Image (cartoon, grey):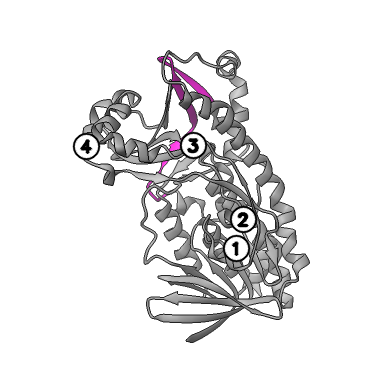
Amino acid sequence: MDALSTDVVVAGGGPAGMVCGYLLARAGVDVIVLEKHKDFLRDFRGDTVHPSTLEAIWELGLLDEFLKLPHQEVKHLRLEMAGRQYTVGDFTHLPTRCKFVALMPQWDLLNFLAGKAQAFSNFRLLMQTKAVDLISESGVATGVEAESSGGELAIRARLVIGADGRRSTIRERAGFEKQEFGVPIDVVWMRLRRFESDPTEPVARVGAGRFFVMLYRGDYWQCALVVPKGAFEQLKRDGIARFRERLASIAGFAGDRVSAIDSFDDVSLLTVMVDRLKRWARPGVVCIGDAAHAMSPVGGVGINLAVQDAIAAANILYEPLGRGRPTLADLNKVQDRREFPTRVTQAAQVLIQNNILAPTLQRTEGELKPPFFLRLLEAMPFLRRLPARAVGIGVRPEHPNIELLQAARNN
């Protein structure tokens, strides 16, 4: 087994892992990030970069270059119900430099971060390398065992950061206990063709037994059909023709394009889960992002929460890493900082799932009437800033410690 050593090994090259790895490397910490795939090209991943994340990118001096990457800007959130369109969120009044959500393929975001991080000699990104176990000594995690395309690796580190997603190997091997919250929905993803005459901002449509979201992706729409938990197997038994009929009934102007879906091989199921670790750390290891708390797709805020975790972890752990191995008290500060926003966000997601989405999907006939909150937003447009702030900025947004990072670079 080959052996490597570093200050920090980050399991997972998603948004949380790449942001945390970049920030620590920029601060002078030796970092290895492990990504199990050969590249970042995977479809139907979260592609929203929220205003608070864009603010952090600006604070790092990278925004102008970042926004040169292909993206679409979403300034309003709209929902169609009973043949009428409602504006439910207005980002144009946010107290941020970018008053919009950027829709960008996640692989572009990750490739951008990887390129910036690899400019530092103390940063290493190992593709096709997956952490499979923790190395522990006297109850303290001292690294990871990993499998790569070239064989097995043992990576020794002062700190292991688990950022390997909702099915995290690190949190399993560390023995972390999670609390699960019942979820009444799943999401079926697919692509539909886009025409030049189509709108460019997201389209959400609600009808009896139907909830459908369309996200503009340049030459196609990335579409999400929300279904009751476990209903996908029944959809497949009903056949692709019936599935296309179901889509056409809610897809609006794109209803005549569903014929391009030839089989269920053209769709992808996201099994929705919402959970949270009771403790995020033990000696030598801490989890962030989906590894610490799997988020619902409601609001599309999962990436934003993961990035905020990464910024907080880098801010908190840089100095302890400079002194040696961070103590458990140091690691617990990450949870102390990020658990409250996670709890609030998940509570809101569960509330929406249970009280809006589930009842809508259970209703099979009749026309839905716009609920009170939609009528209120229509009557008082200034209230649309509140949902926009909740989605675009969230609870307790984090900011990179620029003075610390600059001092480290100067030294």
Question: Can residue 116 be seen?
Answer: yes
Decide whether residue 74 is among the magenta residues: yes
Q: Callout 4, which amino acid?
A: Ala
Above or below, 290 against 92 in this view is below
First in sequence: mark 2 vs mark 1:
1
**Residue 187 versus residue 287: which sits nearer the camera?**
187
The picture quadrant where one finds residue 73 is: top left
Q: Quadrant of the C terminus?
A: bottom right
Q: Callout 3, which amino acid?
A: Ile
Q: Callout 1, which amino acid?
A: Arg
Q: Which mark is residue 185?
A: 3
* Disc 3 crowd, CA 10 A, few/some/many (<14, 14-19, 20+): many
Q: Could you say where residue 240 lies in the image, as x and y percent from the top left?
A: 25, 36
* Disc 1 crowd, CA 10 A, few/some/many (<14, 14-19, 20+): many
Above or below, 383 against 284 in this view is above
Residue of label 1: 171
Residue of label 2: 292
User: Which of label 2 and label 1 is nearer to you?
Assistant: 1
Residue of label 4: 260
Decide whether residue 103 is among the magenta residues: no
**Residue 172 versus residue 89: which sits nearer the camera?**
172
User: Which of label 3 and label 4 is nearer to you?
Assistant: 3
Cα gap from disc 3 to disc 2, whole angstroms: 21 Å
First in sequence: mark 2 vs mark 4:
4
Q: Could you say where residue 269 lies in the image, as x and y percent from the top left?
A: 39, 45
